[in-house]
Image: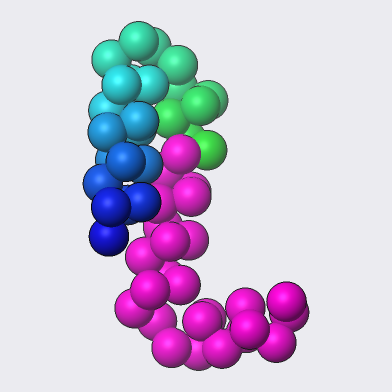
Amino acid sequence: MPFLALLFALFVFALYKGESSSALAILIMMVAALFATYHKPFRDSLREFF
């Protein structure tokens, strides 16, 4: 989970600096990382894709 913690810190920093479009992209990456970690059907579809 260190990658997720790093994304969260980057998300907070982007919001603090006022970069809302970057914060949205980081939020999407965080959601994708959570899905890939905890949601089995999503993880299996990623394995099939790659």
Q: Residue at x 53, y 25 (%)?
A: 21
Residue 45, relative to residue 18: is it above or below?
A: below
Image quadrant in which you'd find residue 20: top left
| Front-lying residue, 19 or 44 | 44
The quarter of the picture where residue 47 lies is bottom right
* Residue ID at (27%, 60%): 1
Location of residue 44 in the rendering, given as x and y in whole percent from the top left corner: 56, 88
Residue 8, position as x, y percentages in the image: 29, 40
| Left or right side of 29 for 16 | left
Q: Main secondary structure of the magenta part?
A: helix
19 in relation to 21, above or below: above
Q: Is residue 10 above or below residue 7?
A: above
Give the residues drawn in magenta, as a range: 26-50
Residue 34 location, quadrant: bottom left
Residue 12 is situated, as x and y percent measured from the top left of the image, at: 27, 28
Q: Is residue 29 positioned above or below 26 on the image?
A: below
Q: How is the image coloured?
A: rainbow
